[in-house]
Image (cartoon, grey):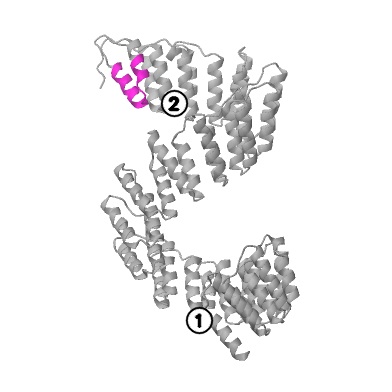
Amino acid sequence: MVVFPKSLSPKHLLKLLKSEKNPRAAFALFDTATLHPNYAHSAPVFHHILRRLAEARMVAQVSRVVDLIKSQECKCDEDVALSVIKAYGKNSMPDRALDVFQRMSEIFGCEPGIRSYNSLLSAFVEARQWPKVESLFAYIETAGLRPNLQTYNVLIKMSCKKKQFEKAKELLNWLWEEGLKPDVLSYSTVINEIVKAGDLDDALKLFDEMSERGVAADVTCYNILIDGFLKGRDHTKAMELWERLSEDTSVYPNVKTHNIMISGLSKCGRVYDCVKIWERMKENERDKDLFTYSSMIHGLCGVGSVDIAESVFKELVESKVFIDVVTYNTMLDGFCRCGEIKKSLELWRVMEQKSSVNTVSYNILIKGLLEYGKIDEATMIWKLMPAKGYTADNITYGVYIHGLCVNGYVNKALEVMKEVESRGGSLDVYAYSSIINFLCKERRLEEASELVKEISKHGVEINSHVINGLMSGLIRESRLSDASFLLKEMAKNGCRPTVVSYNILIDGLRKAGKFSETSAVVRDMLENGWKPDLRTYSSLLSGLCHDGKIDLALDLWRQFLKTGQNPDVTMHNILIHGLCSVGKLDDAMKLAAEMERWSCVANHVTYNTLMEGCFKVRDSNSAKVIWGYMYKKGWGADVISYNIMLSGLCMCGRVRHAIEFFDDARSHGIAPTVVTWDILVRAVVNY
């Protein structure tokens, strides 16, 4: 605590206030001095403390200082009154600003000048009190006061707030005509609001107009535009502006510029551009704050470059910049995602030592441990939460229960569920759907069904994820009628089926060969406003091809292309297999050749299917050509490829060639399977 001298002067107090960086501590010092015997604050002291309070948005204390100025009858100049009007204006208190304005002579002993009028205008604009702005401006013009550029800047701001951008630009042009040269604030006000409205091209035109008219852009103007383009995912324009800024000798990037670039580019997936900017910052010894570091770490972890993120994190630690829990969590998540469990636990210990842990931290670590099968470690962290005073949330429950289920501990997940419910806690639908889904996978359908009924009683809203899991389980047990009934009941119970719901049933019916019922489900799907997606068409296509209805399959293919969707490699492979199955090898070859048109790359299944199709029509030469093309495209051959070649060559009576392929497979380290030996034994017996 500061001990004042017996004879305290305003000059000495002002020095103490300036040395105190904390605004609350500075005000406490000011308050204490107020009670000091034979002491009275001076106008400079009042001005300093008012500015500090305004910057910290401590508006309640501003009112106390105003009362003190009045009670002490301290004569102040207009600057002191301005700091009060501006403080009220920035805090959307225009009536208080107006009251101070009207009582300036009474409180401060000075009369309002044009700057005071401008500040009051600004307060009305901030509060969106347009009629008061217009009436006050009309009064200024009739009262013999001469509006200055700052007055018109406030009017420009009003036009922008009202989305009247053309009016704002007309006002800029009028200022040029009247010889009142607009400044960088005039332009940046308009540019900022146009960027917020999403018209980036218009904002850029206005930015270019500045330089054409001799108004030098400041770093704020650059920051506004760069941020706008990056938020609009136009990293090319953002980089062009960045280069312009780098080449502009009158202005330099600041910490905010670098933060905007690094954060924005990483969100656009341009993390390695971020690395270049980071390196340039280091070369030029530019300052970095926590946001710079955390944005860089977040971007690098997002693309899996955790090793580089770790080096940035180490630099952050060495910089002595305070590290918040969000940044720690980002690095922890990066380690967990790439399986660096040891480093995750090491960082966790540091976070605990620094008391920089929250519920999100626990969620990240529990999820990471479970994803890599560390059940005991995850359970230990789970049990540690309440002991350390942290409360699990729905995400914690969901992550822990889902992780247990994925690792085969469904019974343990059920125990956790009951434990949470017995303590009065509640799970969300994500946690319940995990248990239901994995109960179905373990063929425990009755338990899954009972759980669905139970959670409905608890008021948990059943969604399509829960029902989809149950439907999948029913279909897995060939209970197609029950699955169909469940789909129909979904809508009745307020749970609207999704495309996924329909696809599950369509796929199940297709595998069971019930194509007529499949068509009925598709009709129902369309009637309920759902458009078939890629998976829907793939299932239908597979069913038609399996039934040998290739003409209908081709009709469906053409119908799909008209939807504007692009077929993927799976869909191509289904139709190629169908064409090959009915001996339409040329059509299959043509379809495979057109894959690139849809930005689709052939895979092993494609080549294997085509080779099998060649052998089906006894065309071993074409099969060998495809084999060579497969290698040319960098795929190589798998054991299935070799088995197809062996079987096909033997079927064509070319057993010696088949033996050569067998030797080639072994030389490439591909181990023969039971199928391989069966093919060769049959060939030798029949030879």
Tag 2: Cα neighbours inside 10 Å, few (<14), some, or many (≥20)? some
Indicate the position of residue 361 as horizontal and vertical percent values.
37, 50
Tag 1 secondary structure: loop
**Front one among 496 and 253:** 253
Is 402 located above or below residue 582 in the figure? above
Residue 479 - label: 1
**Is any part of residue 266 visible from this angle?**
yes
- In the rendered image, which quarter is residue 137 located in? top right
Q: Amino acid at mark 2?
A: Glu
**Front one among 625 and 59:** 625
Q: Amino acid at mark 1?
A: Arg
Tag 2 secondary structure: helix
Q: Which residues are magenta?
A: 14-34
Q: Residue at x 48, y 37 (%)?
A: 292
Picture quarter with the C terminus:
bottom right
Residue indicated by mark 2? 55
Instruction: Name the dominant secondary structure of the magenta segment.
Output: helix
Indicate the position of residue 384 as horizontal and vertical percent values.
28, 54
Indicate the position of residue 42 as horizontal and vertical percent values.
37, 11
123 relative to 379 in the view: left or right: right
Picture quarter with the N terminus:
top left
646 relative to 30 in the view: left or right: right
380 relative to 453 in the view: left or right: left
Q: Residue at x 63, y 79 (%)?
A: 658
**Is any part of residue 103 visible from this angle?**
no
Is 308 located above or below residue 560 in the figure? above
